[in-house]
Image (spheres, helix red, strand yellow):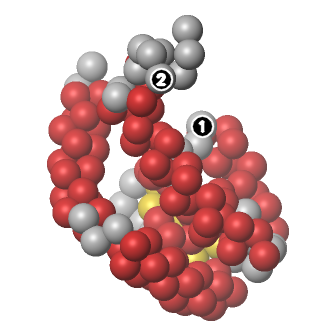
């Protein structure tokens, strides 16, 4: 069968594939910029998540799309490098909260500027992409609550 008469591929119209592929394509540009700065993607994700304040290891793992054992290893390295610090929660001593150390705060400031600049470039090339953000947040919230309720 020649390519003009080929049936469309399932993945070219499948929401999950389109979301993953779009994320990969757009993220790859920024990930290249991170690597040029010597910052790994997991470290960036931790820093970006901690921009909102301290988080538990479990919450970080979920937000950073990592399994908890992998997150623990990333945090071990980041703590050793003086980027984050872990502290027992004052109210619930069973919980450990991860905080930015001064070095992490400094790194984060520069990386947020770079991330915002990259996002602005993407939005300038694809102005309709801004409208997608609300839809994606709603999708994450609805599916996340279903997932936690299982």
Q: Secondary structure at mark 1?
A: loop
Q: Which residue appears at 69% of the width and 72% of the height?
A: 34
Judged left or right of residue 86, residue 76 is right
Q: Which residue appears at 28% of the width and 44% of the height?
A: 140
Which mark lies nearer to you, 2 or 1? 2
Please say whether residue 88 is visible from this viewpoint: no
Please say whether residue 36 is visible from this viewpoint: yes
Q: Contact (CB < 8 A) between labels 2 and 1?
A: no
Q: Secondary structure at mark 2?
A: loop
Q: In the rendered view, would you say 84 is above or below 112? A: above
Q: Which residue appears at 41% of the width and 38% of the height?
A: 18
Q: Which residue is at the front of the view, 1 or 64?
A: 1
Percent position of residue 127, x then y: 28, 71
Percent position of residue 31, x then y: 65, 64
- Whole-angstrom CA distance, mark 2 to mark 1, is 42 Å
Q: In the rendered view, would you say 69 is above or below 24? A: above
Q: Which residue is at the front of the view, 14 or 137?
A: 14
Judged left or right of residue 86, residue 23 is left
Q: Quadrant of residue 1?
A: top right
Q: Which mark is residue 4?
A: 2
Instruction: Give whichever of discs 2 and 1 has the lower sequence position.
Output: 2
Position of the C terminus, as image quadrant, is: top left
Residue at the disc numbered 1? 67
- The count of marks equals 2
Percent position of residue 42, x then y: 65, 57
Question: Badge 2 local density, few (<14 within 10 Å), some, or many (20+)?
Answer: few
Q: Quadrant of residue 87?
A: bottom right
Q: Which residue appears at 81% of the width and 68% of the height?
A: 80
Q: Which residue is at the front of the view, 32 or 8?
A: 8
Question: Badge 1 local density, few (<14 within 10 Å), some, or many (20+)?
Answer: few
Q: In the rendered view, would you say 101 is above or below 1? A: below
């Amino acid at each position: 069968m020649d390519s003009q008469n080929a049936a469309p591929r399932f993945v070219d119209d499948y929401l999950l594939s389109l979301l993953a592929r779009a994320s990969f394509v757009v993220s790859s540009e920024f990930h290249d910029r991170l690597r040029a700065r010597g910052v790994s993607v997991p470290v960036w994700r931790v820093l970006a998540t901690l921009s909102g304040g301290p988080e538990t290891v479990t919450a970080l793992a979920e937000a950073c799309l990592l399994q908890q054992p992998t997150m623990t290893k990333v945090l071990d390295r980041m703590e050793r490098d003086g980027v984050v610090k872990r502290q027992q929660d004052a109210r619930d001593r069973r919980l450990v909260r991860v905080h930015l150390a001064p070095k992490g705060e400094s790194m984060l400031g520069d990386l947020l500027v770079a991330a915002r600049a990259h996002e602005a470039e993407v939005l300038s090339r694809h102005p309709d992409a801004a409208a997608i953000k609300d839809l994606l947040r709603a999708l994450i919230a609805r599916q996340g609550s279903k997932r936690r309720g299982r």
